[in-house]
Amino acid sequence: MEKKYLFSPGPTMLPPEVLLKMAEPIMHHREPEFEKIFAEIRQGLKYLFQTKNEVLIFTSSGTGAMEGAVSNLLSKGDKALVVRGGKFGERWGEICKAYGIEFIPVDVEWGKAVDPARIQEILKSDPSIRAVYTQASETSTGVKHPIKEIAEIVKGYENTVIVVDAITGIGVFDIPMDEWGLDAVVSGSQKALMLPPGLAFAALSDKAWKFVERSNLPKYYFDFKKELKSSKKNQSSYTPAISLFVGLRESLNLIRKEGIEAIFLRHEKLARATRAAVNGLGLELYAPDSPSNAVTAVKIPEGVDGEKLKDLFFEKFGITVAEGQDRAKGKIIRIAHLGYYERLDMVMVISALEMLLKEMGYGFELGVGLKAAEEVLMK
Ligand SMILES: Cc1ncc(COP(=O)(O)O)c(C=O)c1O
């Protein structure tokens, strides 16, 4: 018998309630029935993003919303600052480059969070910077960046916005958009929103909408102004992924039912248990100082083949974990716990980790990781 489990930081496992809704016969997106669903989704997304402003929805993967957050906010000749502490920080830079936007990279050692003082220093010395691009949770390294602190700094610059890739942050830990004064927050469906890949989200502050007004970079599909107009009529500009929207209404209902505060606490507990297990096993965290509650990056111990470990997870247990990317390839595995996960899911994946490490010759006493995790999970 074979069962499959996703412990990758996207796509993630899905609740049966959402799966069932998506299996219903498809409807037409210009019918009143769909508009009603759209209206509910708009409210649910505002609750999740903690904003009074509209959250735009695009049928694309999360990168689409990232691209839109460059092409809609900036204008020819604008300069940006990009926090590069992993694969997804690099992506902000690549998008800027594709649009001919000059950017100053703030390179951060992988596994570390950015020091906000470095951003302050650069903004002070170069007032021509129009946007600061960063991740809330850098999925490739398992790091959480200090968004609140960065936002405090950017607030002091009238002509600069802070743009946050919260693709593995939204619905995982607290990122109160309006309260912190975040100007743009983007996310994607296949993470804590408990949906398949295929939807991207972008929410903008009033300040950011002023940037959109003057933006003259080329754009077509990811045109925020156009999408806002459609959204306010409970429509999308183009044919949306209808079944995903239907699923989204359901996942947002589940999110509301649990409540975001409870959701943040659940993620914190699962993440702390995973980190405790790692420490209990005598392994090291890749991001010990500022770990994200979305995903735990674990250093592969000496003598263990990291890629093989990842492969064995799937071969022996049907479990997908993520390996390291680029410079972290073979050096880490990443165990995700964002979205539809609860305590016993973590017990399972930690147990699998123990069995595999044992087989691969890593020396430890079976059960020490589980014990450490259970002690956290029982509290
Ligand atoms: C932090 C972060 N940013 C961006 C992306 C890219 O999203 P997508 O693959 O949906 O385009 C991901 C996906 O893993 C991510 O985790």
Image (tube, grey):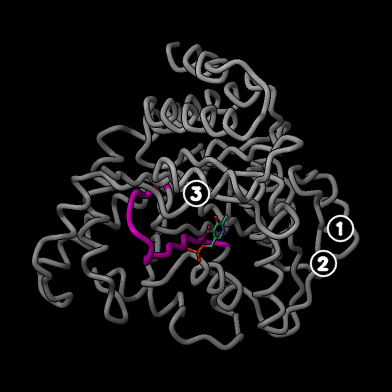
Q: Is residue 30 left or right of residue 100?
A: left
Is residue 136 visible in the rendered structure shown here? no
Q: Amino acid at mark 3?
A: Pro
Q: Nearer the viewer, residue 49 or 278?
A: 278
Residue 295 percent coordinates (x, y): 55, 41
- Which residue lies under the disc numbered 3? 9
Residue of label 1: 122
Asked whether residue 134 is drawn in magenta, I would say no
Viewer-nearest of discs 3 and 1: 3
Q: CA distance from mark 2 to mark 1?
A: 9 Å
Say left or right for 140 vs 377: right
Q: Residues within 10 Å of mark 1 (few under 14, many from 20)?
A: some
Q: Which secondary structure, mark 2?
A: strand
Q: Residues within 10 Å of mark 2 (few under 14, many from 20)?
A: some
Q: Mark 1 is on which residue type?
A: Ile
Q: Secondary structure at mark 3?
A: loop
Residue under the point 54% across and 34% down: 356
Q: Is mark 3 within 8 Å of ligand 1?
A: yes
Residue 162, labelled with which disc?
Answer: none
The part of the chain drawn in magenta is: 192-207
**Disc 2, disc 1: CB below 8 Å?**
yes
N-terminal of the two: label 3 or label 1? 3
In the displayed structure, would residue 318 be above or below residue 209? Answer: above
